[in-house]
Image (spheres, helix red, strand yellow):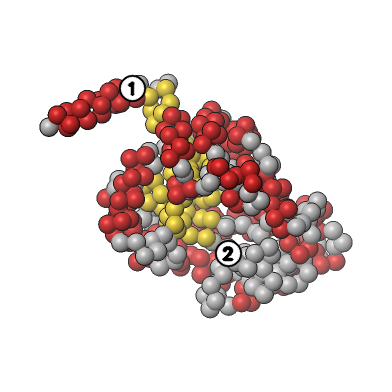
Amino acid sequence: MKKLLILLVVAFALAGCQSNKNKIPVYAWESGPRDKTDKEILKDFKDLKKKGVDGLMYNGGQDPAVYERVGALAEDAGLEFHAWIPTMVQSKEGLLDTSLYAVNGLGQSAWTHPAYVPYYKFLCPEREEVYDFLEGMYAKVADLPQVDGIHLDYIRFPDVILARGLWDKYGLVMDREYPEFDYCYCDSCVKHFKDQSGIDILEVEDPSRVEEWKQFRYDQITSIVNRLADMVHAKDKVITAAVFPGPNSVAKMIVRQEWDKWNIDAFYPMNYNDFYLEDTEWIGEVCKEGVEAIEDRVPLYSGLFICPDPAAKAAEPDPENHGLVPSEIQDAIVESIDNGAAGICLFTPSRMTKEGWKEFKKAIYRPKE
Ligand SMILES: [Zn+2]
């Protein structure tokens, strides 16, 4: 009993400290469920809730039954639950006809010659069969009462230029757009662009100089997003997306996302500073750019890339194992919020160390205005 009393006193004291403060909204990208039991999942979710996470962008494949099951557990834990399912990358054999995959400037299909990594099997955004597949796949998940929203990812072209921090990893110098990484030059895209602009892009020496060709591809992605948004909104659900930073400084240039034109309910730019050899100040700059681009119409949550093993970061050659170390987490959060972000999104909670959570807690409470 005495123990309980002490706990209560401590709890009230903590609550008192924070009563004149607001907690910022916190989301987290999380994958699962692998072979975890319901009990184990619920325990993890309750732990995240206690640490200050409000909602999950949850990737569990494409089977609605997974979202039905895990979504119910998220609700029990008091978490918002969004189904995070990749859009243009579909690398599973037999899911779609291979003729529907994007074609690069050398005429190679992303199905047979994926860029950079084997899973980079991107679909052509022009083909109606592709849209029909995506709509059907997302609709089944959006229909579930356990799902609050659809979270798009890989809603883009393959990186025509890689983030600067990744050049060494792939042994590339990406000083301009190279045809090997430039999509989509399939017959449908070439024809539609010629009908629309009068330009035969296959006859152009340097397609990267043709502004209309760039805009054509921004519009292809925007069209898919806005059609999916209409479908999801008709079901009274929200639709959000993980995007590259920008849109102008990075997203349009390297993955052809003109995301300020997207009719969605929130943006989650992946402000992964280490990929761009930048610091936490840059996170603030790209938040400001994004919020201004969308004219504050909807919230922007700043995606933060967490370092899984801070002690080994300096000796770690792979940038995908870099990320924010505990001493940078407060700065990254403050930079984001001070520059207009409505909250943050962690990639990922499982990469957070004990020390990281401590720093995180110091930054998520803000003085009331
Ligand atoms: Zn195409």
Provide residue 243's location: percent of width, then percent of height.
57, 49
Residue type indicated by callout 2: Val
Residue lying at 25% horizontally and 26% vertically, measured from the top left: 10
Disc 2 C-beta below 8 A from ligand 1: no
Q: Residues within 10 Å of mark 2 (few under 14, many from 20)?
A: many
Q: Locate the C terminus by quadrant.
A: top left
Of label 1 and label 2, which has the lower sequence position? 1
Q: In the rendered view, does 288 fall on the left or right side of 34?
A: right
What is the secondary structure assignment of the residue under circle 2? loop
Residue lying at 67% horizontally and 68% vertically, measured from the top left: 114
Q: Residues within 10 Å of mark 1 (few under 14, many from 20)?
A: few
Q: Look at the picture and state if 48 lies above or below 123.
A: above
Provide residue 289's location: percent of width, then percent of height.
62, 36
Q: In the rendered view, does 301 fall on the left or right side of 156?
A: left
Residue type indicated by callout 1: Cys
Q: Locate the N terminus by quadrant.
A: top left
What is the secondary structure assignment of the residue under circle 1? helix
Provide residue 219's location: percent of width, then percent of height.
65, 55
Residue lying at 53% horizontally and 72% vertically, measured from the top left: 92
Nearer-the-camera pick, 221 or 15: 15
The residue at which mark 1 appears reads as 17
Residue lying at 29% horizontally and 59% vertically, measured from the top left: 38
The residue at which mark 2 appears reads as 89
- Residue 287 shows in the view: yes
Q: Look at the picture and state if 36 lies above or below 253.
A: below
Give me the disc on residue 137.
none
